[in-house]
Amino acid sequence: MNQAGNAVTFPRPDGQSAPGLAFHGPGPAAPAIILIQEWWGINAQICGVAQRLADAGYNVLIPDLYRGKLATARDEAQHLMGGLNFPDALFHDLAGAVAIAREHHGKAAVMGFCMGGALTLAAAVHIPTASAAVCFYGVPPAALADPANLQVPLQCHFADHDDWVTPDLVGKLEEQLRDVKVEHEIHRYDAHHAFFNEARPEVHDPEAAALAWRRSLAFLARHLGA
């Protein structure tokens, strides 16, 4: 893990505690972002994203959904994600993270990639105390969240050549959001799944990643007031 992050624990709504990694911004008055990992776990790449957000003026908390476990190969990541209790992660870990972040920093947004993107969109449906949500190439299963019930301003980033979150799936999401009054925007890129992840050179698209980052920071600043 990136040594810039500090290991922390925070309370969950069910009375248990959850582990995480915290990255400090310019001070406690700065708003917070709950950053959700890809299916790999809390690796150096997601810690790098957290540090970039901290450098941009935010306090960042990465809930450790895998409880210290980390994958380096796709089959390991698939196994870890398959074993994750998504409702527990959403309604207890993420809800607790948003609550503690708001208590200490006033406002909190949720941001995630791939598996974390799916949980981010679900959080935008089920955790109305969040101030905003930024989702990268992830859509939750219907049983976990119905996007038509969106409660939090949402920005999404998807890839046109994604065989995981396909263009058809994104089109369905757009249809589900069509009549939603809460602010939402969907951006598509001529790129592949995980185009933001510089640790995966086979899919990383620097131009698309830079544009998505600028859009994300502008959206977060608008809703968090950083």
Image (spheres, rainbow, N blue to C red):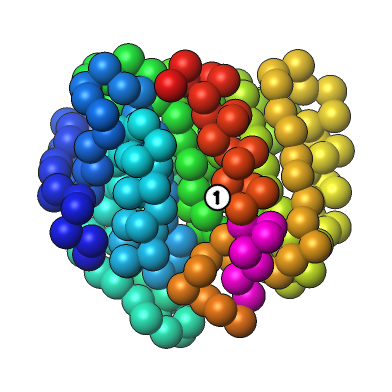
Q: Is residue 9 left or right of residue 132?
A: left
Q: Is residue 34 visible?
A: no
**Which region shows up in magenta?**
203-209
- Residue at the spot 39% in from the left edge and 48% down from the top edge: 52
Q: In which quadrant of the rendered image does the C terminus lie?
A: top left
Residue 154's spot in the image, x, y percent? 63, 31
Badge 1 marks a residue whose secondary structure is helix
- Residue 151 horizontal/vertical position (percent): 60, 21
Q: Is residue 171 visible?
A: yes
Specify the quadrant of the image occupied by residue 146.
top right
- The residue lying at 74 percent from left, 33 percent from top is 185
Q: Which residue is mark 1?
A: 117
- Image coordinates for residue 77, horizontal then vertical, percent: 42, 75
Amino acid under disc 1: Gly
Which quadrant of the figure has residue 93?
top left
Q: Is residue 224 above or below residue 38?
A: above
